[in-house]
Image (tube, rainbow, N blue to C red):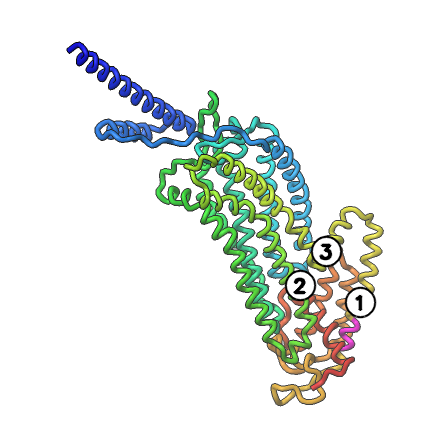
Amino acid sequence: MRFQIIMETRCVFCFLFLLTEHIAVMSAQGKDFNQSRLSMGPLSPTQKSTIVIGNQINESMPRRPKVLPPMCTDPTEIRDTFKYINTVVSCLVFVVGIIGNSTLLRIIYKNKCMRNGPNILIASLALGDLLHIMIDIPINVYKITVLKSETQFFTDMIVPLLAKDWPFGVGLCKLVPFIQKTSVGITILSLCALSIDRFRAVSSWNRIKGIGVPKWTAIEIILIWVLSIILAVPEAIAFDMITMDYKGEQLRICLLHPKQRIKFMQFYKKAKDWWLFSFYFCMPLTCTAIFYTLMTCEMLRKKNGVQIALSDHIKQRREVAKTVFCLVLVFALCWLPLHLSRILQRTIYDERDPNRCELLSFFLVLDYIGINMASVNSCINPIALYMVSKRFKSCFRSCLCCWCLPPEILAMDDKQSCIKLKEELQQVVHLWNTHIIRRSRSAVAPSGRPILMYTIPHLFGGQDYLKEVSQNSVDVCKQECQQRGPYTCDETVFSLCCLIMSENFLTPPSTADESIELYLFLRAHILKDLQLGHFY
């Protein structure tokens, strides 16, 4: 009997011991869970009520709680290294971007021959980059160098550059990502428009105007800016000031808010990385690939006599196409690391993986590289234009020389350029006047007439003969050249070409660039064909 009582007593003690252990385990797990919730900041009343309801359900329906993996709270080893690297890169981007984009805008504003459709789109792109450089980059540098910053992992979410006590307020917290997304939107939409423009220019080579009509270009740029601003509005709504408890301190940081009240913003937060990757990265690359493939097929398809005669003219447009392709390639290389990091986080990351902290460290390194590369994209377009385009290289040198060379040297260069232009204009006028084409009865040039001299009036919708240009009209152009400013020689060519068009009942060019193109066309092709005897 005593043995039975002892055994029953031991069973009761064992049961109480196991029950105590079970309660201790559940208390520890609940404490860890509450600590992880506290690391995300104070809870709103809605969240508190949700937790209370959840506890009531758990009490009525007991179940095994979910075991959360430990948080990654250790700073990475590259924190200080990145701090210096990012500061140096940001300062270089700021200086080079301000000088390069400002010079690019000045070139297109001062030089009338550069005011065509593609260059206006490039100017719009430079203006968007300049806006991003002047507003976003100084704040990022200040956030890194002045504020006490750390790079941590919070609940498996990378929070780079966690600045304590964000001093700029809610306004700049929303403005900085808004400006950044607007700038990227202007870049990708401008690149798409440039790709379409190059295809149209090559497919309709016989239209000197192409699609560079000022009205259409203005409408195009307005649409690009309006659409970019609209697409950047969700960024301004999503970002907000967040208070976090970390290591006993209250942190007020600017971050994409984890709790969005609007349903659309909840969807945007979940699909943001895929949306940015598809629209802001894949879309311009796909658009460029499609239209450049069509442009190549169009070039290979046209092999008639007129196309061969216009080989130099096509070379100029190929140079512009090569410039646009270079801009798209630079954009892809600069933004690939950042998008790659975000997509890998969405696809291969597993929160239950015990080695996920090392994987997050790798993503953080890739994020840092991507942030710097994306910043470089804001200043590298002028450099790419200088290296690829001969016309931009010449204009860059002239513009920079205007700031560094003395006025006497510039005046001497202007005088020599003026004399050279007079000789070239006189040569073109002489060629035009000595080869007047009379009316013809058929649409095909009869034997003995140069094909290019015959087809030029048709390119402008005029008659099939040319009228002699008076010497008085040529003298007016020369007087304009003598009174020229830094870029007035282009206006002289514009005046001469408009004069020829008007006296021959032809539609005059609408921009100086079209006149320059016609002028080069006359000088390079007609003279060459007449000397070589290219006749039907």
Instruction: Answer above or below: position of 411 versus 499.
Output: above
Viewer-proximal residue, 431 or 171? 171
Q: Choose the circle earlier in sequence order: 3 or 2.
A: 2
Q: Choose the circle earlier in sequence order: 3 or 1.
A: 3
Q: Residues within 10 Å of mark 2 (few under 14, many from 20)?
A: some
Give the distance between the C-alpha atoms of the residues marked 3 and 2, in whole angstroms: 13 Å
Image quadrant in which you'd find residue 221:
bottom right
Label 3: which residue? Answer: 393
Tell whether position 430 is magenta.
yes
Range drawn in magenta: 426-431
Would residue 277 be found to the left or right of residue 427 on screen? left
Q: Choose the circle earlier in sequence order: 2 or 1.
A: 2
Label 2: which residue? Answer: 319
From the image, state whether disc 2 or disc 1 is nearer to you. Answer: 2
Quarter of the image with the C terminus is bottom right
Residue found at x 52% / y 27%:
164
Image quadrant in which you'd find residue 216:
bottom right
Q: Amino acid at mark 2?
A: Glu
Residue 531 picture location, percent across and down: 78, 80
Would residue 157 be found to the left or right of residue 532 on screen? left
